[in-house]
Image: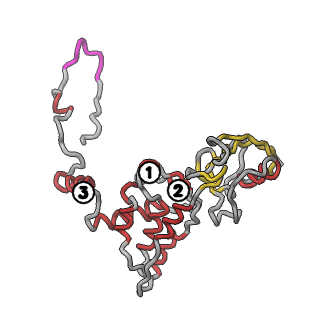
Amino acid sequence: MKEITLRVSRYDPLVDAGPHFEEYTVQVNEGARVLHALHAVHDDHDPSLAYRYCCGSGQCGSCAVRVNGTPVLACMEEARDGMTVEPLDLPVLKDLTVDMGPVIAKIARICPAPGAELPTKEEIEAIKPLRDCIECLSCVSACPALQVTEFAGPTVLRQEMRLALDPRDSVDRIDDAIEKGLFYCTTCRRCLEVCPKEINIPGKAIEKLREIANRRGLTLPRHQEVAQLVQDTGRSVAWTQTTFLEQVPEVIEPDGPVRGEVGFFVGCMF
């Protein structure tokens, strides 16, 4: 057994004006997970602590929380002394439980519309990585684009691509993906960093959907302008003014006595 101290975010919207932290010292076994520490807080200190859990083996996604600011599965993350446990960056119901309903509803509305064609083995292999999602919503909590845009979220676009790859699905998923903010994603890959199943949503879903959209000419107008500029001039940025190198002479005479030689690296010419 070992003793650890952890800070836990507490908030009951029916009672509290806002979230606050409570500190607890608990006894846990060596190798204990965050979930075990929360059990100890609940059993030994405060039975009113609210948190979700189910399988305890990283398969259901119920117990996702933030530990020291990073979304993790509480049942898989090792409990460490001094850690801070907070809810995901979603509307808080109480303490560490959040309202997953709106995001889950978005995923549920992306329903397959089966056609007659069966997938090949190769097509099934392409779909498999996108089917591993356990809907813990860690990616949604970590996504910076969701904080400032109408982006539907990484796992919603993952579901769109999962069905787009399936030949049995007869719905055109590209227009739907664009409406859900396909081009709001910054491909920062934060969702991949926190995904317990290591699903490469930026590479396997979002960029693939953008590739299909681009082939159809459905990219954003500014993106089309840059692509056309590259085609026409070989440059991604247009000349807008005289460059610094054009404003100065090729050789600048020294001011005062020469004391040495200095090489000036001009850097990128764009």
| Res. 139 mark | 2
Mark 3 sits on what residue?
A: 224
Residue found at x 54% / y 53%: 141
| Residues rendered magenta in the picture | 253-261
Residue 26's x, y, as percent?
80, 46
Between discs 1 and 3, the one toward the N terminus? 1
- Which residue is situated farthest in the front direction here? 14
Q: Judging from the image, what secondary structure is the residue with disc 2 in?
A: helix
| Res. 145 mark | 1
Residue 268 in sight from this viewpoint:
yes
Q: Amino acid at mark 1?
A: Ala
Q: Which image quadrant is residue 63 in?
A: bottom right
- Which residue is situated farthest in the top direction here? 256
Q: Judging from the image, what secondary structure is the residue with disc 1 in?
A: helix
Which dot, 1 or 3, sits closer to the camera?
A: 1
Between discs 3 and 2, the one toward the N terminus? 2
Residue 126 in sight from this viewpoint:
no
Instruction: Give the alpha-carbon distance from disc 1 to disc 3, as whole Å.
Output: 22 Å
Looking at the picture, does residue 101 appear above or below residue 19? below
- Horizontal side of residue 233 vs 39, given as left or right: left
Q: Judging from the image, what secondary structure is the residue with disc 3 in?
A: helix
Q: Amino acid at mark 3?
A: Gln
Instruction: Give the alpha-carbon distance from disc 3 to disc 2, as whole Å.
Output: 29 Å
Residue found at x 52% / y 61%: 102
Q: Magenta stretch mostly in which secondary structure?
A: loop
